[in-house]
Structures are given as C-alpha cells and as structure tokens.
Amino acid sequence: MRITHIISSPGAGGAEVYVKDLACAMAAGGHSVRLLFLNRAADIGRDTEYEAEFLKELTQSGVEFGFIGYRARRNPLYGMRQVRRDCKAFAPDVVHCHLYYGAVFCLALSDTKVVYTHHNIRLFAPPWLYKLLDWRVSAYVGICEACTRLLQEVAGREVVRIDNAVAAHRLMPRGLRPNGNPAPTILAVGRLAPGKNLKLLFDALALLTHLPFSVNIAGEGPERTELEAQVKRLGLEGRVTFLGNCRDVPQLMNQADIFVMSSAYEGLPIALIEATLTGLPVVVTDVGGCAEVPRHARNGYVVTDPTPERYAAALRPLLESHDLRARFARNAAQNSDRYRLETAVQAHLSLYTRLTAPSWGDQRSEHAA
C-alpha cells in the first residue's frame, strides 16, 4: 500500500512523534510511506536540531518526506496545489491527515481515499468546516473515547476509534525501585504553553513544600519566562528545574518517580502513554482522553476539579508513600498493552485496506444514507 501522512512539522510534539512512529512501522511492514509536513521547524519556532534528527530517522527507516510550505496557512489554494502536486507524483492509495489544514488541502484531490485524525479535544475550527470535509474525507479517526465522541458530533462520515500509542522499544522501563529516595522526582513533559496549564501544577506544589520532592520540566515554549517567574515567586526555585527541549525523555522517565500533567485541554497525550509504559504512577487532569489511561491502567489519580487544592490532594499520597508508587507501577506494567504501537499500526492498516477495497464505495453510500 502507498500511504501519505500530512502533519504539522518534524517537531517534538506528541502527535508528530506518533505519526513518525506509525510511518516508520508501516514502512518496516513493506508499505511505501511518505510524510508531508506543513511547516519547517524554524517557521514555528521549533528546534532545528531536533528536526534534523527527526528527518534522519525517517530516511533511515525508508520513509520519504516533503514540505507543503508555511505560506499555505494563509493561502489554502496554495496548499491544495502543493498537496495535489505531491500526490500526483507519489500516487498514494490513502492520504491520512493529522491536522485540519491538511484535510482542507485534500479537498482538491479526486481519486485518493482521505482519512482525518483530530489530535485534540478542541476542534480549533468551526463545526461547519467538518460538513465541508465530509465531501472528501472517507473516515475520521478518534484517538481516544472523548475525541471519538467529539468527532461524532460534527462529522457526517464514519468515526473509528484508534487510541494513540507508543513505540515501546524507545522506552526504558523502570522496574520496581527500592525505598531509598527520600525526595521523589516529579516529571512533566510538554510544551510550555497555556494548554499545558503548568501554572496549576506549580500552585499545587506550593501547597506541598512541607514534603520533600524535586521537579523536572521537559519542554520548550512561549510561557517559559512567565513560568520561571511563578516558580521564583512561590519559593520553588530550588526544587523545579526547567530542562528545555529534551532528546532523552525516556531516560528522564526511567529516573523519575511520578509523572504529572495539569493540562487545560488535550487529546490523548503521547507523553502520558510513554510514562505509563515506562511504569510510572501518574496524576492528570480530567481533560480529553487523559483520564482514560490511568482508569484503564490503574496507575494513578485523575483530578476532576482543576484547583491547586484538589491537584495537591491527589499528588500528596504519591509523595508520601513508596508502597503506593510501587503498586501503581506494577499496575502500569500489567495493564498498558493497548497503548503499544503495534496495536495502532494494525488498526490503521485494517482501516486503509477496508477503505480502498473495491466494494467500499457501496458501503459508504449505505452509511451516508
């Protein structure tokens, strides 16, 4: 099968890494795969060295790639021409879009099956746009239960649930730790931007300063200066370390004791899945599909009321009890297979095969009716 994936950029975001892993695994399975990026890393302020490593991994895995061009964000017709030109040269059986810009650009295609995955619990586009996309999109993919329900509310085509997943070979499972760390290490991974809501995490930590702990923050983003000022104002300076964009996240997870997310909105975060497959206990806010992971893996707490007091109350028992952390770690190791990349790859390929089958057009007509 010939497959094109359209994604934002070769950057460190969860969706981008997930699509890279899907593409490499599909190529390893004998499929011809191409990644088409909307932006270069420099266009959106991302790490250019990370981009180079990202593209190197694609090349080594036999995955082709190209760029639509940043100007397509302001000029959809330009984006449509670029995608149409690229697809004419590569001739994919399926174009899988992982951002709504890509789905819009695919409106100019005629014979290729189009799949669209939305990677967040927020639409970031008016609902009427999905009525337009229905004209060209053959099927939508929801990355978790919450995102699937969201798409079902706005889309007029089939919505298939395929949970986000992680290539486990990249991770460093922790195993059980002896009770020797007097100050548990807390890890947060993600872009330093409003959606990750790290201000909530720091306000909660300020309520727990009577307990020993240290915090590592892995990620880059526009809020760094503001967050560093908040940490200083709360008296957390000696406990919180901002690491910037990191290429050693698996090692950071291996060395951590607790993984945290305080997001205001999400889809199904790749970092959360990585932490669970590593064997970490977690504390997350109840947004998007975040709650689905610890409720399935039974490896942590879900904060349904995003206040500093409630978040601190969820984090406190994990800081206080090594035995609780160990129990959640065992649960994570035993209950996380559904989030392995192999499961997601097979589900996607099964969907592509069904969509490209000769009889699929008749099935779509029945579904639409």
Image: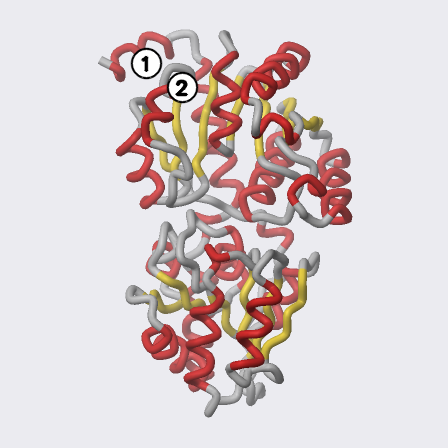
In the picture, measured across the screen, residue 160 lies left or right of residue 68, that is left
Please state which of residues 232 and 344 is positioned toward the viewer in this rendering: 232
Residue 149 higher or lower than 369, as above or below: below
Where's residue 269, x and y in %?
Answer: 47, 52
Q: Label 1: few (<14), some or many (≥20) within 10 Å?
A: some
Q: In which quarter of the image is the C terminus?
A: top left
Q: Residue 364 carries which label?
A: 1
Instruction: Say if residue 214 shows up in the picture.
Output: no
Q: Which of marks 1 and 2 is nearer the N terminus?
A: 2
Residue 350 at x, y = what percent? 45, 26
> Where residue 308 appears, x then y in whole percent?
37, 74
Residue positioned 25% across, 12% down in the render: 366
Query: Marks 2 and 1: in contact by CB < 8 Å?
Result: yes
Query: Which of the numbered marks, if any, corresponds to residue 138?
Result: 2
Q: Which residue is drawn at 37% across and 51% down?
A: 289
The quadrant of the picture occupied by the N terminus is top right
Furthest residue to the bottom? 210
Q: Which of 321 and 99 is in front in this view?
A: 99
